Image (spheres, rainbow, N blue to C red):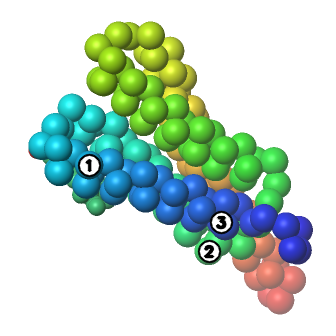
Amino acid sequence: MSGGLRISDFCFVVAALAALGGMGLGIVMGISQDFTLAPAHAHLNLLGWVTMAIYGLYHRGAGRTGGFAGWTQVGSGALGAGLMAGGLGDYLSSGSDRAMPLVVAGSLLALTGMVLFLGLVLADTLRRRAGSFEMTARSG
Ligand code: HEM
């Protein structure tokens, strides 16, 4: 897919946006000395910035640019991070549990993203091993 959005580009854009939001929230918390939203800040930074950036580095390193499995994996991770941080933020600031379904959905999507990540890593590893076995068989 030349010219289109690569999976790693998507991951880095989402990661940077999450970092900007997370850092901004951290600064606001520091200025106001109100740390109510600290868990939302932590999840936006860790699921959004750190996890998505690591996914992006993996996809770029593995040479993955597209494909249904890859997009589903990073899409789940990105949506999970957003729902989790947003839902937690609403839950903590409103005192109501109306956003709990978002938090639950977000956490399950984040988990799904990580399960799919493990699947991709294992599939890539097996493919590489099969490839090097074929090379050995051909040259031997
Ligand atoms: C501009 C950058 C940042 C600022 C100003 C900032 C600010 C803060 C503040 C004020 C707190 C609350 C401290 C307290 O409760 O006493 C906090 C907690 C936390 N931050 Fe940040 N932070 C920043 C970046 C990050 C990043 C990049 C990460 C992770 C990658 C991170 C992870 C956490 C975690 C795990 C907590 C603890 C949350 C909790 O206690 O529930 N922060 N941060």
Amino acid on which the number 1 mark rests in the picture: Val
Question: What number is the disc on residue 61?
Answer: 2
Q: Assign the C terminus to one quadrant of the image.
A: bottom right
> Where residue 3 sits in the image (x, y, percent)?
87, 74
Q: Nearer the viewer, mark 2 or mark 1?
A: 1
Tell me the distance, in whole angstroms, between the alpha carbons under discs 2 and 3: 9 Å
Residue named by callout 1:
28
Which residue shows up at 78% across the image and 64% down it?
A: 5
Sequence-earlier tag: 2 or 3: 3
Residue 95 location, x and y as percent?
A: 29, 14
**Residue 59: quarter of image:** bottom right
- Quick check: marks 1 and 3 in contact, CB under 8 Å? no
- Please name the residue that numbered disc 3 is placed on: 8
Label 2 Cα crowd, 10 Å radius (few <14 / some 14-19 / many 20+): few
Q: Name the mark nearer the viewer: 1 or 3.
A: 1
- Residue 91 placement, left or right of 118: left
Q: Residue at x 29, y 23 (%)?
A: 92
Of the two numbered discs 2 and 1 on the same chain, state the one appearing first in sequence. Answer: 1
> Element type at marker 2?
helix
Q: Would you say 10 lies left or right of 36 here?
A: right
3 lies left or right of 8: right
Mark 2 against mark 3, which lies toward the viewer?
Answer: 3
Question: What SS does tag 3 mark?
Answer: helix
Does any atom of ligand 1 lie closer than 8 Å to the CB of label 3?
A: no
Residue 28 in picture, x, y percent from top left: 26, 49
Q: Amino acid at mark 2?
A: Gly
Give the amino acid type for the residue marked by disc 3 in the picture.
Answer: Ser
130 or 1, which is in the foreground? 1
